[in-house]
Image (spheres, helix red, strand yellow):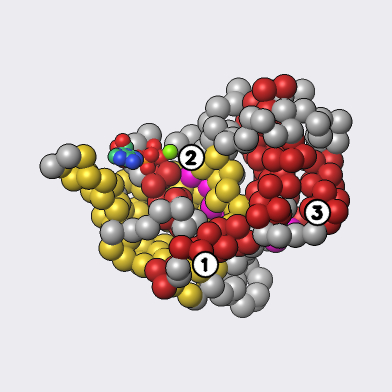
Amino acid sequence: MSESISSIPNTRGTGLGPGASSEPARPPILEARRLVKRYRMGRRSLEVLRGVNLVIREGAFLAIRGASGAGKSTLLHLLGGLDVPDEGEILFQGRPLAGLSETALSRFRNRHVGFVFQAYHLLPELDALENVCLPARMARMDPREAERRGRELLARVGLGARMEHKPAELSGGEQQRVAIARALINEPALVLADEPTGNLDSQTGEEILRLLLEIRAERGLTLVMATHDDRVAAHAPAVVELVDGVIRGQVPVQPTGPDLSGVGC
Ligand SMILES: Nc1ncnc2c1ncn2[C@@H]1O[C@H](COP(=O)(O)OP(=O)(O)O)[C@@H](O)[C@H]1O
Ligand SMILES: [Mg+2]
């Protein structure tokens, strides 16, 4: 039986700031300034994000909590350059995404951001290894190196014996493991996970969360995870809430935990 979610370690290397030690604050990897996003539906306009501000420091693990429909996916899509805001700006390592051409933006997504989605989004006609290697092929990595990394990552996520399986031949949890390996193949500094356990039963969800947290700690990744599930959010050392289109403060999950100054709002 797996350990309960509450036993998953979450305090190592939070990257959120000085904390109890006198470690200097790390630089921001991602900043959102007054982000506004509207969806136009015929003559009506739905303002989903109404001035979102966030500062996420390198190595941080931040959960964005919010009810279904609050705009979490919309925000993650903007942060990862999958969509563009109507107002405001996003800076990655201090540089605005708005200045990038379409080609440069897709290169940014491919090289610097790993995406993990609730519904996995694997290509059905490709096997696990081919799915994992796809972003490396897009980055024009040497095919042998891509395959070496792909095999290593699939072994790391526990799928060493499933490399040639197509998504339809894998369980939901296994598909999410493939998606995590795919997110990591180009060694991004930032992983954006949108309800990564949302389609899974609770035990499988715990295993996937544990895997993400272990990999984050091993690689010093910045992880931003959207979730509507308080039990999942509780594993992040810093949680912010998306309500009425804005970020509502910081919710320290551990009162004696790390300093939260890295998550400016
Ligand atoms: N492409 C779209 N066109 C119109 N409305 C959309 C679109 N995408 C999302 N929405 C609406 O925006 C709101 C926020 O959606 P979303 O970001 O998916 O929320 P969450 O991920 O928090 O559940 C919802 O009311 C949703 O219906
Ligand atoms: Mg969503």
User: Which label number is shown at residue 127?
Assistant: none
In this rendering, position of residue 229 left or right of residue 136: left
Q: Nearer the viewer, residue 244 or 173?
A: 173
In the displayed structure, 25 sits above or below 108; it is below
Spatial separation of the CA atoms under disc 3 and disc 2: 35 Å
Of the two numbered discs 1 and 2 on the same chain, state the one appearing first in sequence. 1
- In which quadrant is the N terminus drawn? top right
In whole angstroms, how far apart are the C-alphas of marks 1 and 2? 29 Å
Residue drawn at the location 38% of the way across and 34% of the way down: 68
Q: Are marks 1 and 2 in contact (CB under 8 Å)?
A: no
What is the crowding at mark 3: few (fewer than 14 residues within 10 Å), some, or many (at least 20)? few
Mark linked to residue 227: 2
Question: Measuring 52% from the left and 38% from the top, which residue is drawn there?
Answer: 195
- 232 to the left or right of 219: left
Residue 104 tag number: 1
Residues drawn in magenta: 219-227
Instruction: Name which residue type carries label 3.
Output: Pro
Residue 119 colored in magenta in the image: no
Q: Secondary structure at mark 3?
A: helix
Q: Are marks 3 and 1 in contact (CB under 8 Å)?
A: no
List the single residue furthest toward the left: 43
Look at the numbered disc 2 and give the secondary structure of its residue.
Answer: strand
